[in-house]
Image (cartoon, rainbow, N blue to C red):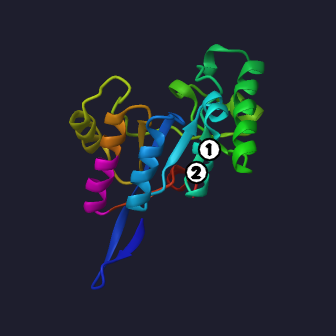
Amino acid sequence: MAAVTTGKEYIEAKKVAITFDDGPNPQYTEKLLDGLKERNVKATFFLIGKEVKEYPDIVKRMHAEGHLIGNHTYEHVNLCEVDAKEVKWQVEQTNDLIYEVTGERPVYIRPPYGCWNKQMEEETGMLEILWSVDPRDWECNDTDVLISRVLKQVDDEGIILFHDASQSSVDAALTVIDILQERGYEFVLASEVLYE
C-alpha cells in the first residue's frame, strides 16, 4: 500500500485497479476518458484488435493520457476453443495494430472469458491479467445495481472489470471511482496490482 499524507498524518492507501474490456467504443469510450481525466485516474484498457483498427484516434488518446493498454484478442474469441496458430494470430494481430497506433507493444492480455494457459503464455510472451471484481455489466444496464455489485466485492488490491460499451457502465464506473476515492482507495494500473 502507498502512503498518502493528509497534512497531519500518514494513511495507508488501499490500491485498486479499474479495467475496461472490449473497446474502443465510438459512443462511450471518450465519455469515459473525459471522466477519468477529470478525476485524475489512470485505467487499464484491454482492446479488441478490430476495434483498434476502426477507431485508432481513441486509442491514441488513451495512450497519450497515460492509460495502460492491453490485448483482448482481435475478435473476442475464446482462446481455449481455437488452435495454437489461431491463438497466435489473434494476439499478434492485435499487438501489431496497437503498436502501429501507440508505438508501444502490449505486454499484458486479458483473454476473453478468462481462458488462458501456460502454453499460450509461452507461445505469445504475454502476461495474463484477470479480475477480482465483476459487476457483470454486460448483462445489466442498471447503474445503481452495478455500483452496488462492485462495492460488495471490492477490497485492497482488487481489479475491477467493466466494459466501456454502455452508458450505464460508464456512469457506474465513474461513480465507483468517486466513492472508492472517498473511502481512501488509490487507483493504479492493473499491472501495479499484479506485477509490481
Quarter assignment of residue 143? top left
Q: Main secondary structure of the magenta part?
A: helix
Q: Position of residue 10 (x, y in %)?
A: 33, 78
Q: Residues within 10 Å of mark 1 (few under 14, many from 20)?
A: some
75 to the left or right of 154: right
**Residue closer to the observer: 30 or 183:** 30
Q: Which mark is residue 61?
A: 2
**Residue closer to the observer: 21 or 185:** 21
187 to the left or right of 109: left
For residue 108, above or below residue 163: below
Q: Amino acid at mark 2?
A: Arg
Which quadrant holds the N terminus?
bottom left
The residue drawn where x is 48% and y is 51% is: 43
**Residue closer to the observer: 193 or 146:** 146
- Is residue 190 located in the magenta-colored stretch of the structure? no
Q: Secondary structure at mark 2?
A: helix
CA–CA distance in space, label 1 to label 2: 6 Å
Q: Position of residue 180 (x, y in %)?
A: 29, 55
Quarter assignment of residue 152? top left
Q: Which mark is residue 57?
A: 1
- Is residue 179 located in the magenta-colored stretch of the structure? yes
Which residues are the magenta region?
174-184
Q: Are marks 1 and 2 in contact (CB under 8 Å)?
A: yes
